[in-house]
Amino acid sequence: RRALRFGVAADRLAHSPLTQASLTQTLTSSPLQGTLTGHTAMVFSVAFAPDGHTLASASGDNTVLLWDLTTREQPRRLGPPLTGHTDWVSSVAFAPDGHTLASASGDKTVLLWDLTNREQPRRLGSPLTGHTAPVSSVAFAPDGHTLASASADNTVLLWDMGPLEELRRDVVKQACTRAGGPLDTAAWDLYVPDVNYQDTCADR
């Protein structure tokens, strides 16, 4: 980092082919350099998990990718792309506990993802709707209890994340309670598309 700062300063003080070449050499040989490839369109946003080992990237290809950066010299992709948005994904944010990811999109929605198992992430609940224009940014409060979303509709919406832990702990029980009875496969696919079908009221 110090070498990069000196290189930038030298180029600004006496811009020349020599200082430019020196700066380029420093950049191309720097251990800070690295490229994560996998998206098929422009990447709009990146966010580190609180532990610093996982990175999420949001793209114009309508997906979010997760990256394992435990070994920075050998980053690898985690699991399949997170799909569910129908337009470009503009922003991603991790909850303070690192187990939940929020993604904002041009489709005017925010999606929540359960990353308890980062190799097999799954969607949590239904899309958060309320904005009338593309959602440009999302951010969790430090306590994780509130999520804020910013939109091109000139508004910011605040979302209560209180029920999130309950939903994550037992999605099947929650589905039975909220539906008031068992869900058939068609209803399950509609409301819980990212979880394998289970009998929601088997213990009744």
Image (cartoon, rainbow, N blue to C red):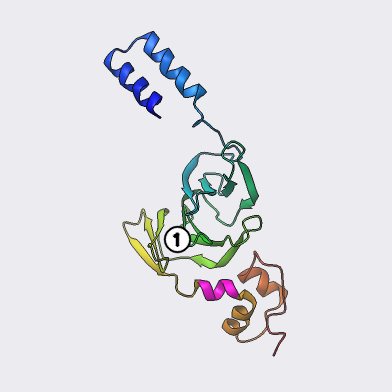
Q: Main secondary structure of the magenta part?
A: helix
Q: Residue furthest top?
A: 17
Q: Locate residue 141 relative to residue 164 in the image: left or right.
A: left
Residue 190 rendering spot, x and y as whole percentages: 63, 69
Residue 100 rendering spot, x and y as whole percentages: 52, 62
Q: Locate residue 46 relative to residue 143 in the image: left or right.
A: right
Q: Which residue is mark 1?
A: 96
Q: Residue furthest bottom?
A: 204
User: Residue drawn at (56%, 39%), measured in percent from left and top?
Assistant: 72
For residue 15, which quarter of the picture?
top left
Q: Is residue 75 magenta?
A: no
User: Residue drawn at (40%, 30%), measured in percent from left and top?
Assistant: 1
User: Residue drawn at (45%, 74%), measured in percent from left and top?
Assistant: 162
Query: How would you rate the neighbour count of disc 1 (Cα within 10 Å): few for under 14, some for 14-19, many for 20 or more?
Result: some
Quarter of the figure that contains the C terminus? bottom right
Q: Residue furthest front?
A: 2
User: Residue drawn at (62%, 80%), measured in percent from left and top?
Assistant: 173
Residue 27 rendering spot, x and y as whole percentages: 46, 23
